[in-house]
Image: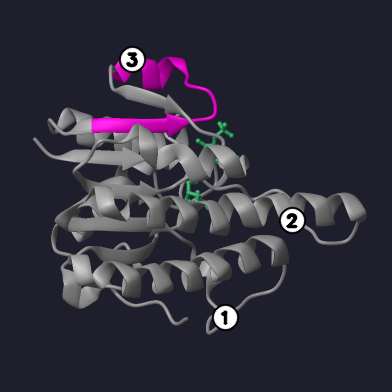
Amino acid sequence: MSTILITGANRGIGLEFARQYSQDGWEVVATARHSGEELDALGVRVEPLDLADADAVASFAGKIDGPLDLFIANAGTNHPMEGKSADDARAWQAMMMVNAIAPYVLGKALLPRMAEGGRMIAISSGMGSIGDIGAGWVPYRTSKAALNMAWSSLAIEAKPRSVTCVLVSPGWVKTRMGGAGAQITAEQSVADIRKLVVGLGIEQTGRFLRRNGSEIPW
Ligand SMILES: NC(=O)c1ccc[n+]([C@@H]2O[C@H](COP(=O)([O-])OP(=O)(O)OC[C@H]3O[C@@H](n4cnc5c(N)ncnc54)[C@H](OP(=O)(O)O)[C@@H]3O)[C@@H](O)[C@H]2O)c1
């Protein structure tokens, strides 16, 4: 049986990953700050994890025996939207931890627990692209650009163990973050990413991809 670890699995895209992989017979380890009815209903193993808690993030790998076939660093926040006030600045610092630092620290610590040939996927965003930049959302954009750099470094560190590390943009998805007006459902996004993941090998490591497999400019 294949094993997957997913962060932020209590709602949105993370919950959908947990649902689809568990329906497919995978052993799912789901992390969440707080579980919820929908996650509990899946009957998968749930581990509490707040990605803003540096100590919890640094020690988390000790709870995983491995081997893990797939790690999806999914949890993320889009708060704050602006970088204008001191409160925004404090929230922006916290966002950097959740969106960029914690995924890398977790990924690095989990490396020895990855199966050879395993895959580590960070859910990034087109908003992290400097080559395809738009206006606004500066805190979120910087956090995802930092995630892209950290995960690219992780790809180099993971290569000797034949573990593939890829950054994937899920598209504009109808979740609490994406809003009701978004283009696709979490079900569609996750189904596409799962298809993409199956075809990912070490030759793709370090890439920044759309869910259809095309490359996003850095
Ligand atoms: N939706 C989109 O259109 C879109 C587009 C591009 C990229 N993304 C990325 O996709 C990923 C999933 O987003 P989503 O759309 O599913 O958003 P969402 O519905 O807002 O879900 C975010 C998830 O991250 C968790 N999370 C937030 N802060 C956390 C923390 N400090 N510790 C642990 N978990 C935390 C949330 O848990 P709580 O319930 O505890 O807050 C929730 O499970 C994110 O990385 C996001 O940046 C989304």
Q: Is mark 3 within 8 Å of ligand 1?
A: no
Q: Residue at x 48, y 54 (%)?
A: 105
Whichever of labels 1 and 3 marks the residue nearer the N terminus, that label is: 3
Q: Is residue 185 left or right of residue 80?
A: left
157 or 78, which lies in front? Answer: 157
Crowding at dot 3, Cα within 10 Å, few <14 / some 14-19 / many 20+, comes out as: few
Per the image, label 3 sits on a secondary structure element best described as helix
Q: Which residue is mark 1?
A: 130
Query: Is residue 7 visible in this depiction of the protein?
Result: no
Q: Which residue is mark 3?
A: 41
What are the residue bounds of the magenta stretch? 28-42
Whichever of labels 1 and 2 marks the residue nearer the N terminus, that label is: 2
Q: Which residue is mark 2?
A: 92
Q: Nearer the viewer, mark 1 or mark 2?
A: 2
Q: Residue at x 12, y 30 (%)?
A: 25
Question: Alpha carbon of mark 1 to alpha carbon of mark 2: how far?
Answer: 18 Å
Crowding at dot 2, Cα within 10 Å, few <14 / some 14-19 / many 20+, comes out as: many
Question: Alpha carbon of mark 1 to alpha carbon of mark 3: how far?
Answer: 40 Å
